[in-house]
């Protein structure tokens, strides 16, 4: 089906002939199209998707509904048979069984059977989907824990979509109407197993695609309920530009713009004296404006065109207020042309629908219909892409018109119109914790663009730590919106750290916009949102389901935001890296094997962000706003490992011309060849659109390889330059030895229709880079050990002259030299790995085997040197010194945290270099504070997940509010050695829990 057809709201109805049911008992007949059986109709839309209708009056629906748009599906063959009164409709993927008769569908007369990789399954009406992966509610502002809403994805491998009550499209009147029957059934049954991507694609085929949003909406938004004037909004915009913090959107609340704050469409000319000039100024500075909209009744005070609307609707002259009713076609037209068009003509981008306008028709969800009217109306008026955002679902359900209070999910189809606002969130850690799986579960309902409200609105200021962590999370959320009630959400209001964090993560978000915008297009085509569950990419891996506070951002990036306080210290988070891949830490470059849980300690200046090895990320140059400059140079970040490819999508960002093929794809590929040769190709762009660059420059950055011997553009050898001397305009290639990145800059513009090939020769393999990382890490520990040895040596000499280092330093430097040789000649290092275990044993022996012997073969002539040699010859390290050096050499560190209230649970795990010592055992002890009565007590001790030891602790009662220090001791024992390490763990007590309010 063409994209234009999928995107159209007015679906061309397909008249399908009814096929007579098979008349011969037990005889199978091949069918396509619809099948009637009594008062039931079955339509096989795809091998794994069947529509099942029951109509008491046989008034089956062939029109589109407000939820289900697509009635035109390719013919799918199926078999029909009757056995013992049961009708069977069988496709290659499933079998529907219905007991003949005229009864509605129940567990007694309907079942669906299908097979997938997990075996055979049977579903009947009323079965509970106990493995659903979650949906989203209408508003989570007051939530503390996730709800029980269901989405389309389930580990049970099926989903039933009930469209029985929705209003339908009337082709003659080109408007909606109620269904002809109130007690019919209109069900869609999907059986998909673990093919979650296929399920989302079919769901989008049925309900309509995820929209292509204006590209600027993916940038940074800022808003506030503070009653800023036009001049104050301009001042804020200037500050963003001065601070070089990117900004694309201003969200203007009613208190800044509306004459009557909570209703009406007239301007507050005191706050906004010249709206047209204001919008023009903002657009000139690259900032789009969205206005807050409420839906109180129209009055003469709130809307200057009140009389025009009254006359249009035929209301009497004494009418004092007009309530919205978007189910009325005439009123809906006035709603857009009289109330919204003037602002659109001035330059308003779209509206924040704070609530919804009533739509008084059975089966017509008010929120969905308000979104539809404004979205479609904006596209009609402006000729540009529509966009609106509001709360999810219907916050004020209209029971009379078919949507009762407590409806579990928003109406299907709301995803087609833009973005979703999670409500007035409170800036608590628990809220941030809730939002991480929320975005993923929204994607399970085709809701790709969630507006999470960065740092919430419920308080004037927030703790600087949660402000920074929330900012990090928002930078990898579908949309980024700072919003406060009385302001105080701007980065500079949180000091230098707030500005530094905003710079780092906003610049990163904007760099990634070509990548994100490509996935926005893919979401439009496939139904798979850019933010998606790890299980969508890795459905067969069990931990992909249990680690819910991480997600994929596209296929190449794994994000695990921090959602708990560190109180100034790094936060420990367990992160599952999917098997079958290697992963690189985006910020440090460290390489991890997949199929493991990483115990990640994250300082405040970064977040856990991993790139899949064998990936290409297209990046943009630094920008103040999304459309400031074309994608020139195009930055191509290549992460070596497996061969990789990526298609970069581009269009004009705002128009509807993409429906007519006005866009371009540029293929990128990375191929690892034999002999340490690596080829990166930038293919010719295919397609055209308005504003497209004809030529551009390129910057290619390659991670996960060794320093190349040569770099070539085609057959031309490029010049190597020193990284510290080479700026942005410097051509050739550079090697960053610390980050281990090769950067190739092609500074002369190249026509986009030409293919560009870059070759790295003698750059080793990804396995070489991984082993080099291992060697560098071990060498760093060796050097730190030598530092401790030299400090002891200097103390022993006490200023005396000496001419030969002691044995312990000489033996340590033997290992360091071996490692230096490997670092200097890393080619093929994966095939000749060092024996870390033998190296460790060598250094450990040097600690105790005459460590300070320093006799010369040729005796020193200076008597003072001879005396110093004798003085230190029998010196030894103290036990605590040996322990310190051993811990450094083995990379020992206790990972621990204490959490919970009113008493804590402490978890601890000793991290160490297992390759350096071989098999080992770890034992744990804990020390408790000596305070309070009856005293601190350890109540439980158990092995926790991922190798943690878990201790339950009871505190004195009443618990003392504040900080308490616990101590963990870990003893590591291996063949030939033992050592121990301590760590103090801080636990914060909030004191007595709040007494429950029993008056409610």
Image: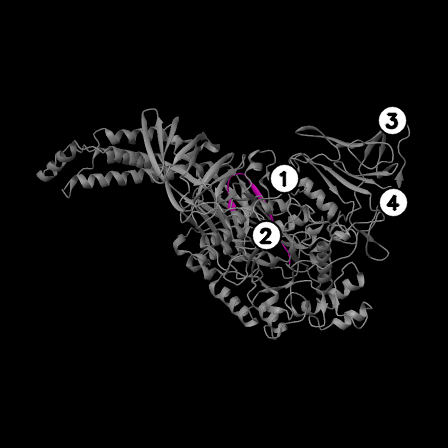
Q: How many marks?
A: 4
Q: Can residue 645 be found in the magenta stretch?
A: yes
Q: Are marks 4 and 2 in contact (CB under 8 Å)?
A: no
Q: Residues within 10 Å of mark 1 (few under 14, many from 20)?
A: many
Residue 879 image-quadrant placement: top left
Where residue 190 appears, x then y in whole percent?
Answer: 73, 38
Q: Pick the residue in front: 516 or 953.
A: 953
Per the image, the residue denoted by label 4 is: 59
Q: In whole angstroms, how far apart are the C-alphas of marks 3 and 1?
A: 40 Å
**Residue numbers of the magenta segment:** 638-651
Q: In whole angstroms, how far apart are the C-alphas of marks 2 and 3?
A: 57 Å
Q: Nearer the viewer, mark 3 or mark 4?
A: 4
Q: Nearer the viewer, mark 1 or mark 2?
A: 2
Per the image, the residue denoted by label 3 is: 27
SS for tag 2? loop
Where residue 106 appears, x then y in whole percent?
Answer: 79, 35
Q: How is the image coloured?
A: one colour
Q: Residues within 10 Å of mark 4 (few under 14, many from 20)?
A: some
Per the image, the residue denoted by label 1 is: 133
SS for tag 4? loop
């Amino acid at each position: 089906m063409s994209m234009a057809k999928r995107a159209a709201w007015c679906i061309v109805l397909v008249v399908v002939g009814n096929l007579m049911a098979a008349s011969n008992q037990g005889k199978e007949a091949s069918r396509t199209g619809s099948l009637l059986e009594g008062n039931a109709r079955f339509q096989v839309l795809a091998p794994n998707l069947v529509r099942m209708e029951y109509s008491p009056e046989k008034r089956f629906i062939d029109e589109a509904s407000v939820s289900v748009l697509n009635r035109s599906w390719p013919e799918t063959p199926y078999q029909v048979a009757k056995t013992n009164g049961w009708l069977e409709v069988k496709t290659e993927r499933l079998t529907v069984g219905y007991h003949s008769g005229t009864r509605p569908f129940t567990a007694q007369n309907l079942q669906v059977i299908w097979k997938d990789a997990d075996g055979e399954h049977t579903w009947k009406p009323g079965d509970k989907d106990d493995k659903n992966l979650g949906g989203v509610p209408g508003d989570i502002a007051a939530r503390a824990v996730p709800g029980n809403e269901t989405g389309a994805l389930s580990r049970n491998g099926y989903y039933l979509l009930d469209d029985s009550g929705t209003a339908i499209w009337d082709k003659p009147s080109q408007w909606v109407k109620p269904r002809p029957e109130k007690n019919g059934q209109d069900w869609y049954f999907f059986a998909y197993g673990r093919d979650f991507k296929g399920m989302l694609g079919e769901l989008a085929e049925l309900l309509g695609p995820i929209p292509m949003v204006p590209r600027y909406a993916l940038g940074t938004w800022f808003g506030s309920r503070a009653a800023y004037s036009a001049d104050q909004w301009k001042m804020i915009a200037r500050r963003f530009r001065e601070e070089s913090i990117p900004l694309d959107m201003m969200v203007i609340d009613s208190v800044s713009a509306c004459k009557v704050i909570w209703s009406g469409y007239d301007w507050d000319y005191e706050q906004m004296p010249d709206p047209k000039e204001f919008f023009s100024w903002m657009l000139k500075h690259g900032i789009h404006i969205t206005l807050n909209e409420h839906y109180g009744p129209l009055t003469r005070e709130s809307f200057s065109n009140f009389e025009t609307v009254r006359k249009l609707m035929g209301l009497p002259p004494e009418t004092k207020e007009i309530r919205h009713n978007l189910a009325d076609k005439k009123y809906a037209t006035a709603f857009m042309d009289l109330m919204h068009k003037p602002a659109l003509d001035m330059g308003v981008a779209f509206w924040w629908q704070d609530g919804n306008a009533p739509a008084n028709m059975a089966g017509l969800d008010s929120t969905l219909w308000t979104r539809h009217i404004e979205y479609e109306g904006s596209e009609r008026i402006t000729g540009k892409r529509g966009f609106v955002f509001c709360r999810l679902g219907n916050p004020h359900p209209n029971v009379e018109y078919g949507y009762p209070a407590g409806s579990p999910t928003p109406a299907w189809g709301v995803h087609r119109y833009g973005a979703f606002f999670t409500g007035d969130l409170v800036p608590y850690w628990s809220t941030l914790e809730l939002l991480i799986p929320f975005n993923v579960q929204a994607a399970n309902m085709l809701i790709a663009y969630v507006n999470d409200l960065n740092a919430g609105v419920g308080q004037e200021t927030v703790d600087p730590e949660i402000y920074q962590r929330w900012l990090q999370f928002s930078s990898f959320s579908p949309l980024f919106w700072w919003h406060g009630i009385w302001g105080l959400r701007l980065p500079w209001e949180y000091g230098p750290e707030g500005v530094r964090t905003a710079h780092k993560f906003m610049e990163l978000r904007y760099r990634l916009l070509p990548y994100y915008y490509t996935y926005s297009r893919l979401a439009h085509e496939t139904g798979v949102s850019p933010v998606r569950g790890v299980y969508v990419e890795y459905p067969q891996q069990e931990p992909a389901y249990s680690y819910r506070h991480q997600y994929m951002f596209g296929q190449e990036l794994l994000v695990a935001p921090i959602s708990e306080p560190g109180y100034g210290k790094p936060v420990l988070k367990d992160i599952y890296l999917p098997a079958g891949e290697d992963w690189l830490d985006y910020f440090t470059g460290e390489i991890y094997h997949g199929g493991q849980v990483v115990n990640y300690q994250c300082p405040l200046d970064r977040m856990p962000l991993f790139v899949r090895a064998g990936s290409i990320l297209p990046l943009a140059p630094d920008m103040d706003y999304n459309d400031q400059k074309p994608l020139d140079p195009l930055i191509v970040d290549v992460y070596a490992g497996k061969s990789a490819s990526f298609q970069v999508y581009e269009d004009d960002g705002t128009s509807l011309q993409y429906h007519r093929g006005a866009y371009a794809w540029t293929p990128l590929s990375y191929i690892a060849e034999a002999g340490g040769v690596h080829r990166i190709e930038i293919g010719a762009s295919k397609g055209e659109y308005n504003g497209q660059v004809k030529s551009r420059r390129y910057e290619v950055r390659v991670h996960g390889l060794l320093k190349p011997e040569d770099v070539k553009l085609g057959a031309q050898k490029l010049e190597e330059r020193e990284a510290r001397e080479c700026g942005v305009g410097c051509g050739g290639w550079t090697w960053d030895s610390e980050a281990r990145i090769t950067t190739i800059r092609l500074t002369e513009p190249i026509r986009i229709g030409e293919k560009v090939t870059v070759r790295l020769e003698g750059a080793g393999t990804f396995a070489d880079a991984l082993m080099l990382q291992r060697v560098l890490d071990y060498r760093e520990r060796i050097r730190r050990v030598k530092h401790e040895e030299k400090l002891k040596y200097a103390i022993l000499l006490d200023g005396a002259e000496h001419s030969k280092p002691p044995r312990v330093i000489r033996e340590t430097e033997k290992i360091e030299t071996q490692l230096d040789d490997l670092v200097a000649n890393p080619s093929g290092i994966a095939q000749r790995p060092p024996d870390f275990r033998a190296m460790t044993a060598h250094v450990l022996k040097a600690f105790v085997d005459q460590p300070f012997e320093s006799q010369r073969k040729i005796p020193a002539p200076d008597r003072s040197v001879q005396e110093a040699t004798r003085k230190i010859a029998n010196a030894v390290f103290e036990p605590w010194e040996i322990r310190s050096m051993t811990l450094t050499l083995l990379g020992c560190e206790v990972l621990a945290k204490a959490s919970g209230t009113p008493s804590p649970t402490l978890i601890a795990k000793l991290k160490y270099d297992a390759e350096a010592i071989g098999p080992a055992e770890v034992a744990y002890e804990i020390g408790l504070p000596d305070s309070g009565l009856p005293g601190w007590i350890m109540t439980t001790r158990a092995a926790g997940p991922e190798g943690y030891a878990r201790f339950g602790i009871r505190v004195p009662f009443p618990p003392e509010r504040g900080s308490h220090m616990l101590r963990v001791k870990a003893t590591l024992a291996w063949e030939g050695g033992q050592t121990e390490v301590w760590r103090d763990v801080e636990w914060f007590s909030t004191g007595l829990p709040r007494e429950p309010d029993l008056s409610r």
